[in-house]
Image (tube, grey):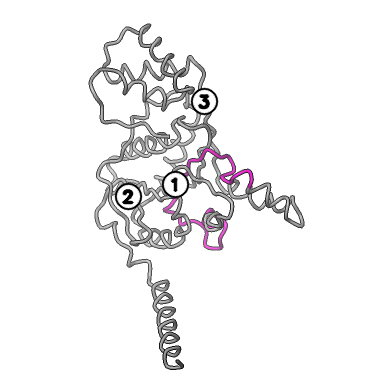
Amino acid sequence: MEDVRAEYGNRDVLLRIAEALERLTPPGHLSGLEKIAEGYLWFAAERRLKPVTRISRIDIDLLKRVDSQREILLDNTRRFALGEPANNALLWGARGTGKSSLVKAVHAAVNQEFSKADTPVALIEIPREDVGTLPELLAFLEATKERRFILFCDDLSFDTGDAAYKSLKAVLDGGIAGRPENVIFYATSNRRHLLARDMIENEQATAINPGEAVEEKVSLSDRFGLWLGFHNVDQDGYLDMVLSYAEHLGFAWEPDELRRRALEWAMQRGSRSGRTAWQFIQSLPAKSCDLEMSD
């Protein structure tokens, strides 16, 4: 019996050593940037960046009723592309209002403006569940000084018991190393403070000092230098989007009939937003389009 225990004990020791060595593997062993592309997907488990040959996005001129947000994010992204000081950005608000569409459209617009550059600004999408691996990814990107990167996390939020927000908090200028100069972080969320309401309320109810507990949670969103709010549009704004999409795609519909059908569609969906307008256009019996509308 003692021999068996010794054998399993040795296995445990070897396993711990292997795990420690894996953690110590230098960031340079990550792969994916060998191919220059505008976009990449981060696969944390494989320690790999997968190049994206075609980023799914729409033209920036098609995004209606977000003029202020568009100009602010464009200016911030231009300054980042030029190596000037720029802020991390949180785009928050109602579903379907074009938050992630704006991030991707701005990225494309800035790269088009700097089309003569040898290497375009790269957009790297990181899944919410892999936010805890950001420090490792940043160490790799910092060593790639000849390129600039926008890290993009869509639909970012944290639920009760999720401690990954602490890793993000350290990355957003909170750690002693700070954020690498060639990296910026853009996120979209339906929550202004990124955390579930019950998560904040639970902390407030159980903490010795409730005010400090809530401040700890809310301070995460404060680490973003830019807060851009998105809200549901009124009826005129919704119809403006519908007509704009129809014109862009060359749909030969009578405007009054198009408006009537669009309002019926919105009533059935119980929503008026950019996404609803785009879904309505896609439902029309006209030529198809390979563009996509996302939140």
Instruction: Report crowding for label 2: few under 14, some 14 to 19, many 20 or more residues within 10 A (C-alpha).
Output: many
Task: Determine whether 2 is above or below 79 in the image.
Answer: below
Q: Which mark is residue 82?
A: none
Where does the magenta region start and end?
169-198
Residue in the picture at 39% in, 45% down: 81
Residue in the picture at 47% in, 54% down: 131
> For the residue marked with disc 3, what is the amino acid?
Asn
Seen as rendered, the residue at the extreme bottom is: 2
Seen as rendered, the residue at the extreme front is: 1
Answer with mark 2 or mark 3, whichever residue precedes in sequence: 2
Find the distance from the CA under tag 1 to the CA under tag 3.
Answer: 22 Å
Occupied quadrant, residue 12 = bottom left
Q: Which mark is residue 232?
A: 3
Which part of the image, by quadrant, shows the C terminus? Answer: top left
Task: Determine whether 63 is above or below 198 in the image.
Answer: above
Q: Which mark is residue 153?
A: 1
Q: Which mark is residue 40?
A: 2
Instruction: Report crowding for label 3: few under 14, some 14 to 19, many 20 or more residues within 10 A (C-alpha).
Output: some
Instruction: Report crowding for label 1: few under 14, some 14 to 19, many 20 or more residues within 10 A (C-alpha).
Output: many
Answer with mark 1 or mark 2, whichever residue precedes in sequence: 2
> For the residue marked with disc 2, what is the amino acid?
Tyr
Q: Position of residue 228 (x, y in %)?
A: 53, 35
Q: Position of residue 279 (x, y in %)?
A: 36, 25
Residue in the picture at 40% in, 22% down: 277
Relative placement, left or right, of 168 versus 47 is: right
